[in-house]
Amino acid sequence: MSIFSVQLLTGLAYGMLYFMIAAGLTIILGVMNIVNLAHGTLFLLGSYMAFTFMNQQFSFWIALLLSVAVTAVIGIIIEKLFIRQIYGKELEQVLLTFGLAFVIADTAKWIWGTEPQTMAVPALLDSSISIGPMVFPFYRLFVVLIGCLLALLLWYFESKTRIGAIIRAGVDDRAMVSALGINVGVVFTGVFAFGAGLAALSGVLGGPLIGMYTGMESDILVTSLIVVVIGGLGSWKGSFIGAILIGLIETFGKIWFPSLSMLIVFLLMVVVLIIRPQGLFGREVA
């Protein structure tokens, strides 16, 4: 039972990590209808920038804030220079963001090299708790807490604030919102920056868990896309449930079926799409 509890908490920690990056991806997709295949590289940038700031003697928390802020600014630049030119053009979006992913990933290799790196757990969280005869790292519980707090924040932001109402209205009828005198372009830029910041946040928090290595942007993008598809396009609630399912399946799958864990994840996605093509919480398309 102790081993099961430890693996359950581990699966939840990875699930919350997937939720943080998938939430940014699905918010951009749901609000702006942009398929951002460069989202995984924003995760990469957040992780490596925090690593660099910590090597310059900044604390983990300062490095976290700086990395999220810088990545959000990069997101603003990407949206203004590139994405804004191709709203409503799905093929162009895919090709552009796919190309940006390669450019950013190769730039990261040029700056930081290809050797795997590790990020130290912050001293405040570098401890463990006892679960029967087992011990569990406190940092993973912290990641679970941050993921749950983010879910609550997104719920409040979406349903209880004026900006959330404007965003929801902009999704359904952008022309009407613009006619009311609201600058939808500025709102969309803010949404893209927020999604980029979430990717960086997950990258920094994921550093001590999964490390940093060449190609991790592709791995995390594939996983986050699976989460988004299972949860439903544009639904952060679906991403929350989908991320927990994927985290638990990956964790327990690696114990019980180590060579089939990813196959089980893809099978889950196929089953969900067969039963409910729009995903668990996706909206029906008329």
Image (cartoon, grey):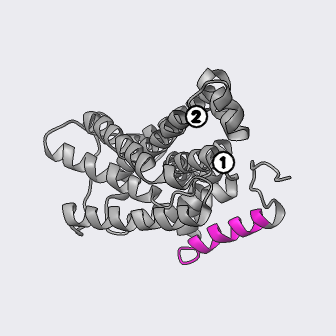
Magenta-span inclusion, residue 258:
yes
Secondary structure of the residue carrying tag 2 is helix
Viewer-proximal residue among 21 and 73: 73
Callout 1 amino acid: Gly
Where is residue 127? Give x, y as percent. Answer: 32, 40
Q: Position of residue 208 (x, y in %)?
A: 33, 51
Q: Classify mark 1: residues with Cα within 10 Å, few (<14), some (14-19) or many (20+).
A: many
Locate residue 240, reporting x and y percent: 62, 45
Residue occupying image coordinates x 70% and y 52%: 232
The stretch in magenta equals: 257-273
Q: Which residue is disc 2 drawn over?
A: 184
- Tell me the mark number nearer the camera, choosing from 1 and 2: 2
Q: Is residue 147 left or right of residue 213?
A: right
- Please say if 121 is above or below 99: above
Q: Nearer the viewer, residue 78 or 159?
A: 78
* Amino acid under disc 2: Val
- Residue 196 or 149: which is nearer the viewer? 196
For disc 1, the marked residue is: 234
Q: CA distance from mark 1 to mark 2?
A: 18 Å
Is residue 236 within the magenta segment? no
